[in-house]
Amino acid sequence: MSSAPNPLRLRRRLLVVVVTLGGVLLSLAGYHWARTTEQNAFAAEFQRQVGAHSALTREIIGSFESSLFGLSILFASSDHVTREEFAGAARRMEKRYPAIAALEWVPVVPADRRTEVENTTARELAAPFQFQVPAADGGMMRAPDAPEHFPILYVEPLPGNERALGYDLAFGPTTHEIGQARATGNLVVSARVNLLQETKGNRHSVIFIWPVFAAGDRNRCLGFVQGIFRVEDMLASPPGDSAAEMLDVLYLDLDATDAGRRFLHYQSAPAVNHIPTETELRAGLHHPAELKIGNRTWLMLYRPSAAWRASQSSLMPWGPFLSGLLVTGLLAGLIHTLSRRTEIIAQEVAERTAELQESRRQLESIVQTVPGMVYRCTAEQSTRVLYASEGTVTLTGHSSADFVAGRIHLRDLIHPDDLDRVRRETRTALRAKAPFAMEYRIRQPDGAERWVLSRGRGVHDDQGRLRFFEGLAIDITDRKQAEADKLAMERRLFEGQKLESLGLLAGGLAHDFSNLLTTIIGNASLARLESTPGSHTQKTSSRSNWPPNTPPTSANRCWPMPARAASWSNRSTSRTCWPPCAPCCSPR
């Protein structure tokens, strides 16, 4: 038959399981916290890098706008800007900004001046020149007539951009943007375009269009300065930009009406062939930043590069986890050991407690048989009772609970005539560290007096200070009564002995006195017998006739006394019987 499970053992196992589970959970929480902390730090650094890169990009784009605005001032401040002047200013800008694919001057030419402008330009170029547009076969053809023409008259650099020279933008892809720039008087940026002169089909450009008005007349538009920028070169990070190695950036044109022209550029380190979609880039950690350029808004969508993310991922989060598991194992082992030890100690305590309870039961059983009260009191001024046996009820008429609770105290029961003596003797014995024993009287609730014999001693600590005093108070009323009865009997016996002695003395005196009286009376009788008849002696020989105060008369008067003395002697000796009885001890 299997024994019942030990509650301590079950509790120990449960505690170990709880500690282990708690430790594992805390370790996981520590790992999560460390991981989250690392990720938050990475996210903060990512935000900082995004802020730095976006600010740098805005600064670069702003410099493009400023340079183009400076070129427009050249035309606004001069009645006629020659081709050489334009080329000189353009070359200086190209050296500063490699992203420039071309800088162009596009005048506003009314229909009536078309021929004049075409002829003048042909003479300047020393080659045929006309306003032209792309033909269906891929070549160029003469531009149709229109109220106004916007031909590209100046282009720099010219090598590689020959096809753009003479292109009439009144029929080009940026006609709407030209009209918008003319109407607003501000910079207008085109959507993504593919240039005629661009041989690589995957390289996109944007056109910055800045209108030029006659001095003091906003209604008279002279033309437009155009800057054609290759998006890839324009948005490329400058040398020394650390963010280029950390960030993947997707540039989108939010104002593009054609979804296919929404994409502008994707920059990553290292370069990849696959360009992620906006949805893919937004799937993980990312940060959008808008860039306002003229009339358009570009979106720069950032995410950390895979290489940078990998470099920022460390084993640090595993530290709290592994440390937590180690501490959990050590703590679980310690708890198991301590719980096991506690279980052993608890078992020993239970055994000792059982032994102590048995000893206490035996002591209580023995104490209950003691004819009196076993007590223990504190040595304080108030003398509080700590323990009192059940014999208290028989001895004092009060329960032990009354004494322990302080509802009654032994000093309240001691006879007033004995109280000072009891206190004095008790204090003297306790100060001397000696046992004490004294007899005194107590009063029960019904008024009866009982004699008590109290024996006790003080209990001192290691420093010799009195802590408690304890003892035994027993009822000696019967013994005191027996002693009183014995004393009374001894007194009666002594009185009887005295009476017996007096009786013997009285008997002896009666005997002696009787002998004397017999002699006296006998001699008196002999004297009478020997006297002559008629003599004075004969006449007075009769007892009744003896004169008073004569020896015969006195002897006759004393004659009954010996008899009475003998009778009293007999009566006194008869009272010495034991035990005394009513017939002989009662007065007669």
Image (cartoon, rainbow, N blue to C red):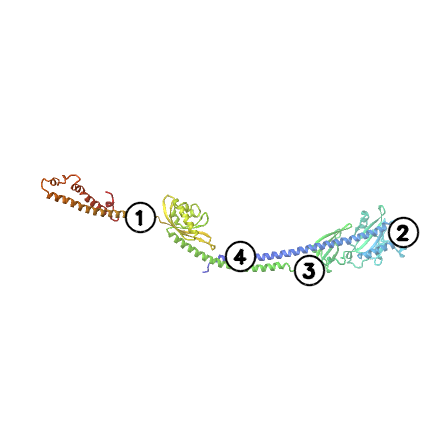
Judging by the rendered image, the residue that carries numbered circle 2 is 116
Foreground residue among 3 and 211 = 3
Give me the C-alpha separation between circle 4 and circle 1.
77 Å
Q: Which badge, 4 or 3, is on the more N-terminal residue?
A: 4
Residue 281 appears at what percent x and percent y? 70, 56
Quadrant placement of the C terminus: top left
Residue 25 appears at what percent x and percent y? 59, 56
Front label number (4 vs 1)? 1
Can residue 113 be seen in this snapshot?
yes
The residue positioned 72% from the left and 54% from the top of the image is 50
Residue 315 appears at what percent x and percent y? 64, 60
Give me the C-alpha separation between circle 4 and circle 2.
102 Å
| Secondary structure at numbered mark 4 | helix
Looking at the image, is 195 positioned above or below residue 183? Answer: below
Q: Which badge, 4 or 1, is on the more N-terminal residue?
A: 4
Give me the C-alpha separation between circle 4 and circle 3.
42 Å
| Secondary structure at numbered mark 2 | helix
Residue type at mark 3: give it. Ser
The label shown at residue 487 is: 1
Report the side of 48 relative to 376 (left or right).
right
Residue 13 appears at what percent x and percent y? 52, 58
The label shown at residue 311 is: 3
Assess disc 1: are there few (<14), some (14-19) or many (≥20) residues with their C-alpha within 10 Å of its C-alpha.
few
| Secondary structure at numbered mark 3 | helix
The label shown at residue 15 is: 4
Q: Which badge, 1 or 3, is on the more N-terminal residue?
A: 3
Residue type at mark 1: give it. Leu
Assess disc 3: are there few (<14), some (14-19) or many (≥20) residues with their C-alpha within 10 Å of its C-alpha.
few
Give me the C-alpha separation between circle 1 and circle 2.
172 Å
